[in-house]
Image: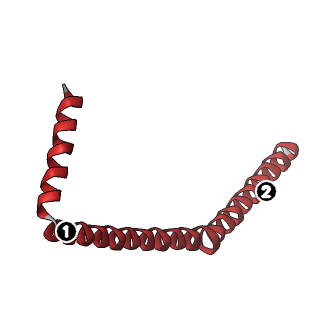
Amino acid sequence: MGFSKKVSNTVKDVADDTQEQIQTLRAQVESLLNDRVTPALADAAGRAESAVHNARDVTSARVETVSAQVRDQPIIAIIIASVVGYLIGRIAR
């Protein structure tokens, strides 16, 4: 019985060491996530938000420019819209 008790204790020691190593690895992974991944995601989100704001500003400026041109030259705007509508209608058939 002494041999089986030694084997049992050795298995228990190995299991305890394995659990400790798993806990250490979990802590390291969590630390890496907090130190590197989370800030990188926050930075990417900030850049994406900035790009959206820039795109919105450019779009608004373009809409204002086109609106001003339509107000300044309504006849030309109507002709252009008619031609575009006609072409789309021809292509859609």
Q: Position of residue 69 (x, y in %)?
A: 21, 68
Q: How is the image coloured?
A: secondary structure
Q: Which secondary structure lies at badge 1? A: helix
For image coordinates 46% across by 67% down, the residue present is 48
Quadrant containing the C terminus in the rendered view? top left
Q: Give left or right: position of 1 versus 34.
A: right
Q: Position of residue 41 (x, y in %)?
A: 53, 68
Q: Give left or right: position of 87 versus 3.
A: left
Amino acid type, residue under disc 1 in the picture:
Ser
CA gap between label 1 and label 2 equals 78 Å
Name the residue that disc number 2 marks: 13
Name the residue that disc number 1 marks: 67
For image coordinates 64% across by 71% down, the residue present is 36
Does residue 12 sit above or below 43 in this rendering?
above
Residue toward you, 23 or 45 = 45
Residue toward you, 91 or 36 = 91
Q: Position of residue 89 (x, y in %)?
A: 17, 33
Q: Position of residue 72 (x, y in %)?
A: 16, 71
Amino acid type, residue under disc 2 in the picture:
Asp
Q: Give left or right: position of 9 versus 82.
A: right
Q: Which secondary structure lies at badge 2? A: helix
Density class for disc 2 (Cα within 10 Å; few <14, some 14-19, many ≥20) is few
Task: Tell me the number on the disc at residue 36.
Answer: none
Residue toward you, 71 or 1 = 71
Front: mark 1 or 2? 1
